[in-house]
Image (cartoon, rainbow, N blue to C red):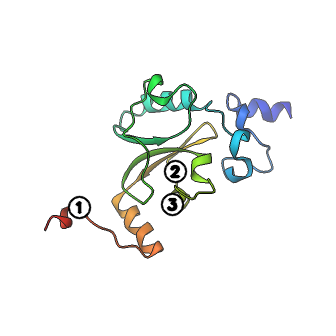
Amino acid sequence: MVASSWYVYPYSMSYFNGIVPVQERPECLLGSNIDWGQDAYFLQRFLSKHSEIKDIRIEYPCPEGIERLGIKTLGSPPIVPEPGWFALGANDIYAASGRYSWFKRCKPVAMVGYSIYVYHVSSEEVERLNRESGQETIHPENERK
């Protein structure tokens, strides 16, 4: 138990156990079991190390407030697939409302701590997601014609 706790340090708060790794099955630990906003500081560090992420939309409850940590966000992620950079807390992705459930069909490019998933969704991936759900992809450049 001590060794496994040291293994996940400094992300101990959202550690479950070695049998059911939370990064693979976050729905096992939703609510305050996985997240108290503790990974916002790690998100700040992550974004400062990744200058390629210029515009990001974030849905993550942080007691401090994301903006107070110096993190610039373009607002909340969309509820339908769109291309771009996104960071969401596990609680938001797996919420009963299903508001951001489309992210479950995407592969995150990074995980910050054990509670924040970072996605880079391409236009091709949006088309794939829309095809799978039977939706038509609307291209903004075609909309003006």
Whole-angstrom CA distance, mark 3 to mark 1, is 21 Å
In front of the other: label 1 or label 2? Answer: 1
Q: Where's residue 143, x and y in %?
A: 20, 66
Q: Where's residue 11, x and y in %?
A: 68, 32
Residue 131 falls in image quadrant: bottom left
Judge left or right: residue 36 versus residue 141.
Answer: right
For the residue carrying disc 3, how many other residues have a C-alpha within 10 Å: few (<14), some (14-19), or many (20+)? some
Residue highlighted by disc 1: 140
N-term mark: 3 or 1: 3
Judge left or right: residue 4 versus residue 87.
Answer: right
Residue highlighted by disc 3: 102
User: Which amino acid type is marked by label 3?
Assistant: Trp
User: Which residue is at a point 66% across and 47% down the rendered structure image?
Assistant: 23
For the N terminus, the quadrant is top right
Whole-angstrom CA distance, mark 2 to mark 3, is 12 Å
Q: Is residue 35 above or below residue 127?
A: above
Residue 40 falls in image quadrant: top right
Query: Element under label 2?
Result: loop
User: Which residue is at a point 74% across and 33% down the rendered structure image?
Assistant: 7
* Farthest-out residue, left: 145
Kindly identify which numbered label has been placed on residue 108. Answer: 2
User: Which residue is at a point 62% across and 41% down the rendered structure image?
Assistant: 115
User: Which amino acid type is marked by label 2?
Assistant: Pro
Q: Is residue 118 above or below residue 47?
A: below
For the C terminus, the quadrant is bottom left
Q: Where's residue 128, x and y in %?
A: 42, 68
Kindly identify which numbered label has been placed on residue 8. Answer: none
Nearest the viewer among 15 and 92 is: 92
User: Which amino acid type is marked by label 1?
Assistant: Pro
